[in-house]
Image (cartoon, rainbow, N blue to C red):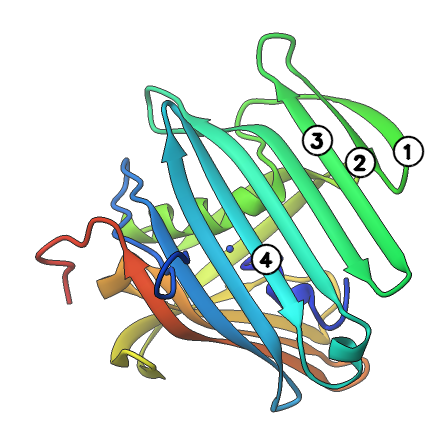
């Protein structure tokens, strides 16, 4: 789910070392380490911060998103969510989830979840709300963290419609998105960037999720917005700093 920090509405989210980690160039069958930092707003007021990092060690990749509230009641409660996905790239470029971990904490309360993907046995085992689960594993399924990376890569390939199947919270879930024809310019800390708009489809028509992706940054989302029409709550993320590793000399328009 596009940078799980949107979930920090508080408390149902996807590079930063030295400066502020953000997405590196991510052409169709390639990945590059990156880090990105976002400010998170709730109804127009600064709520906290989110960081996303993608790193490689040997054949394995680690994608991590951490979101922390440091303002208002959410900050007082010490709200923090951390998700981590370890995965490998198959020969055809497919992202293969291996391990997924989730931690959500507020003062006096903590929730954890995990999932382990066994591609030899074609099953995934995990824990959600302290209950064990085992599910059959189907080609193409991933943990929910990898939606962020898969969406960026498919945008780079020019796709317009996106459908992802994930194993999350002890169930298999479907996520669908559509790229619109809208081309706009989005203000970021790095200046004005040309962006394309992607809408996520929800079963609840009163809920909207939109993300603006910059082709120049490998289709990194530079702004994300979730609107909950049931209580008129708006959660927004805005890119504040980014680092690509390595940065190509030309990233397109």
* CA–CA distance in space, label 2 to label 4: 21 Å
Q: Are marks 3 and 2 in contact (CB under 8 Å)?
A: no
First reached walking from the N terminus: tag 1 or tag 3: 3
Q: Which of the 4 image quadrants contains residue 180?
A: bottom left
Q: Are marks 2 and 1 in contact (CB under 8 Å)?
A: yes
Q: Identify the residue at horizontal 16%, vertical 59% (top origin).
A: 251
Q: Residues within 10 Å of mark 3 (few under 14, many from 20)?
A: many
Q: Are marks 1 and 4 in contact (CB under 8 Å)?
A: no
Say which of 187 and 151 sits in front.
187
Look at mark 3 in the image and give the residue it sits on.
115
Tell us which disc is closer to us: 1 or 4: 4
The extreme left residue here reads 249
Asked if residue 11 lies left or right of residue 138, the reply is right
Give SS at disc 3.
Answer: strand
First reached walking from the N terminus: tag 3 or tag 2: 3
First reached walking from the N terminus: tag 2 or tag 4: 4
First reached walking from the N terminus: tag 2 or tag 1: 1
Give SS at disc 1.
Answer: strand
* CA–CA distance in space, label 3 to label 2: 9 Å
């Amino acid at each position: 789910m596009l940078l799980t920090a949107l979930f920090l509405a508080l408390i149902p989210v996807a590079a930063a070392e030295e400066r502020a980690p953000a997405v590196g160039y991510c052409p169709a069958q390639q990945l590059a380490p990156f880090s990105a930092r976002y400010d998170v707003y709730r109804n127009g007021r600064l709520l906290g911060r989110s960081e996303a990092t993608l790193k490689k060690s040997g054949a394995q990749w680690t994608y991590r998103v951490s979101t922390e509230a440091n303002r208002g009641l959410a900050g007082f409660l010490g709200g923090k969510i951390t998700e981590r996905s370890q995965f490998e790239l198959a020969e055809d470029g497919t992202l293969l989830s291996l391990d997924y971990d989730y931690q959500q904490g507020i003062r006096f309360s903590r929730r954890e979840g995990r999932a382990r993907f066994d591609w030899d046995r074609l099953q995934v085992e995990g824990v959600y709300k302290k209950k064990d689960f085992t599910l059959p594993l189907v080609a193409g399924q991933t943990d929910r963290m990898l939606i962020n990376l898969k969406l960026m890569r498919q945008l780079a390939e020019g796709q317009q419609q996106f459908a992802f199947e994930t194993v999350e919270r002890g169930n298999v879930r479907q996520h669908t998105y559509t790229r619109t024809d809208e081309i706009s310019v989005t203000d970021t800390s790095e200046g004005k960037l040309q962006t394309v708009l992607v809408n996520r489809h929800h079963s609840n028509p009163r809920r909207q999720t939109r993300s603006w992706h910059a082709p120049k940054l490998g289709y990194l989302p530079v702004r994300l917005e979730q609107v909950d029409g049931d209580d008129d709550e708006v959660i927004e993320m805005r890119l504040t700093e980014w680092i690509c590793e390595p940065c190509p000399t030309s990233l397109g328009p």
